Amino acid sequence: MESAEDYQTYKALLDWQIELGATEAIGDVPVNRFEAPKKLAEPARPAAAPATPVAEPRADPVGEARAAASAAGTLDDLKPALAAYDHCPLKRGARNLVFADGRPGARVMIIGEAPGREEDLQAKPFVGPAGQLLDRMLAAIGLNRAAEEIAQAVYITNVVPWRPPQNRNPNAQEIAMMRPFVQRHVDLAEPEIVVLMGNISCDAGLGKQGITRLRGQWTEAYGKPCLPMLHPAHLLRTPAAKRETWADLLELQARLEGTA
């Protein structure tokens, strides 16, 4: 137990502090102000934010088609390059790749639109009813896809090598993807004349549609003299248009004979 003297001493000191203006005690434990301060603890560093994932570059379907097509040195190289191209959604719904038929190096190269059901099954262009009509049209001016003589031969392909669902028209994106392959196909086949059959073929080769307006007028596509013509499927639906097509066939024949 503390002595009365100590009590009186401490009370006097406390009264003196109050007279000086002290109003409250800061802590229960006395602090030595002459002692060197301890090193302050470093503030905790905030946790590093998770790294933002780097977005993968978006695919360029047309650029990749251009690179794949230009790398093909022959028609035998172009077909597997086209088969390996995975950006066209039509590929996933088709049975077969429909590449070409006829004689490479023929004077005339016919470019149609897209395969139908029979073409998809047989993996050849123009083998259905429209193709049978095309064969009769070509025979009328002395041409045949099976001809052994190069002067009578033709070479046939389509803008799109895979059948669209329900035989719908290829859309603008699908046409754009295939255009580099078609250009390379023409370069490697080396025809004298290109025949564009139908609106889609004119869209790919000329950048415009309106086949009833374009047909029968010589122009240039893929760096070759070009003649737009009505598609045989249109002739099956509109027999009256066969007169105009016969005129176009005679124009093609005259050009081949050098009398146009």
Image (spheres, rainbow, N blue to C red):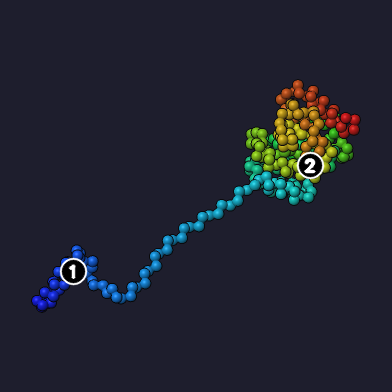
Quadrant where the image shows the C terminus: top right
Task: Residue lying at the far top in this picture: please name it.
Answer: 240
Q: Is residue 145 visible?
A: no
What residue is at 90 percent from the left and 30 percent from the top? Answer: 259
Q: Is residue 56 left or right of residue 186?
A: left
| Residue at image point 81% right, 28% down | 248
- How far apart are the alpha carbons under marks 2 and 1? 106 Å
Task: Give the residue at mark 2.
Answer: 186
Which of the 4 image quarters holds residue 247? top right
Q: Is residue 35 left or right of residue 218?
A: left
Tell me the mark number nearer the camera, choosing from 2 and 1: 1
Residue 164 x/y as whole percent: 66, 37
Q: Which residue is mark 1?
A: 17
Query: Based on the displayed image, in which of its 4 quarters is residue 223 positioned?
Result: top right
Picture coordinates of residue 225, whole percent (x, y): 82, 36
Q: Residues within 10 Å of mark 1 (few under 14, many from 20)?
A: few
Give the residue at x 82% y 42%. 190
Q: Position of residue 168 (x, y in %)?
A: 65, 33
Query: Which of 26/232 is in front?
Result: 26
Q: Mark 1 is on which residue type?
A: Gln
Q: Is residue 35 above or below residue 154?
A: below
Coordinates of residue 71 in the picture (x, y in percent): 75, 50
> Residue lying farthest front?
20
